[in-house]
Every structure is written in structure tokens, then in C-alpha cells.
Image (cartoon, rainbow, N blue to C red):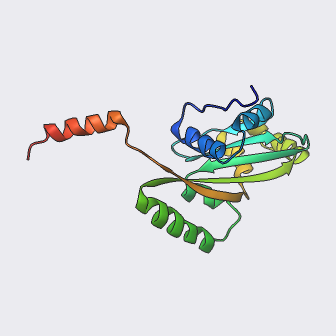
Amino acid sequence: SENAMYVPNGNGTECGMLKFIQNNGHPVQDLMKNKVGRVKTFVPWTPKRKMESTAILQPGDDNTVRVYSKGAPEVLLQKCNMNSAQRAQLLKDVVDNEMGANGIRPFAYAYKEMSLGDFEDLALQYEDFKNVETREILEADLELVGIFGLRDELRNSFEDSNKTVAEDIKF
């Protein structure tokens, strides 16, 4: 129905961000529908990289590819258009002092746009982005959107196991 809302499920980080977007009046279900069949390449999250990126042919503009990236601020900010002093200030003030001190897990989001022709030229030059090293060219010169924080609530299973460990330890 036209009033139906998308119900996020799966990865807690993804669900948290989708709920944030939805709670701020953006129809997530439309955003999800609009990207179907338009993803040009995907660079997955790995523990080593601590970030991921998706290149999408922009809905409504068949000549523009937008690369969306998200990840750990200390990694993603290295790929953004800013000087080292700006980067250090953001990491100290926002990530460490505001979020870290309050138990909030930070995520940085950034993007860049290029023409479809430029994207296709890069794909030819970098072997159609077949491996992570060649895909990283897509993640250079990004524009920072923002740093968002998610509060990691203790899961019931963690609380239960923590209680069991505490009961088993005798001082």
C-alpha cells in the first residue's frame, strides 16, 4: 500500500541507519526500490578495510554514477577531501570526545559523483574493479556527508553470559 513502511531487518548497523532515515521523514522503501538494477559495483566491508562502498547509477539521471561509502571514521576520513588538521580535529572532537566518551559507535558516510563515461573509463582501466585494490580508486576524493553514532545496547544474550561469568569467578 502507499502508506506501507519498510521494516529493516538484518545487520544492526544497517537497520539503525535505515530507521534513522525513515524516522526523519524519508520513504526508505522508495529509496530501496529506486536502486534496484542500478548498482554498478560493490566493494564489501571487511574487518581489514573497515569500510564499504557502492557505486550506483543515479535514479533519474542515467549519466551520473554516485559512489556511496561508509565506514570507520579513522579509515574513511583518510579518503575524504580535507586536510590533516581538519581530519584530526573531527577525530578528536566528534569521534573520541563526543561519541567515544559516551559509548556511541561512530560511522562516517561520504560520497562522490562522476559521469557514467568516467566510471566506465575507470572500469576499463582498472579491470572492471575485479579486486579490492582496483576498486579502491572509486574511494578516492570523497566528500564527507557526516559522522553518525549508534548506541550499542547490550544484548540479552551478552547480559546473561556476563552474569554467568561473574557468578563463576570467585575472588
Quadrant of the drawing holding the N terminus: top right
The residue nearer to you, when weighing 115 against 127, is 115
Counting from the top left corner in percent of width and height, residue 105 is at: 48, 52
Counting from the top left corner in percent of width and height, residue 152 is at: 44, 46
Q: Residue furthest bottom?
A: 85
Q: Is residue 100 left or right of residue 162?
A: right
Res. 89 image quadrant? bottom right
Q: Residue furthest top?
A: 1
Seen at 64% across and 58% down, the residue is: 146
Q: Residue furthest left?
A: 171
Res. 153 image quadrant? top left
Seen at 78% across and 37% down, the residue is: 128
The residue nearer to you, when weighing 61 against 19, is 19
Seen at 72% across and 57% down, the residue is: 142
Seen at 60% across and 33% down, the residue is: 8
Counting from the top left corner in percent of width and height, residue 165 is at: 20, 38
Counting from the top left corner in percent of width and height, residue 150 is at: 51, 49
Total numbered labels: 0
Q: Is residue 4 left or right of residue 12?
A: right
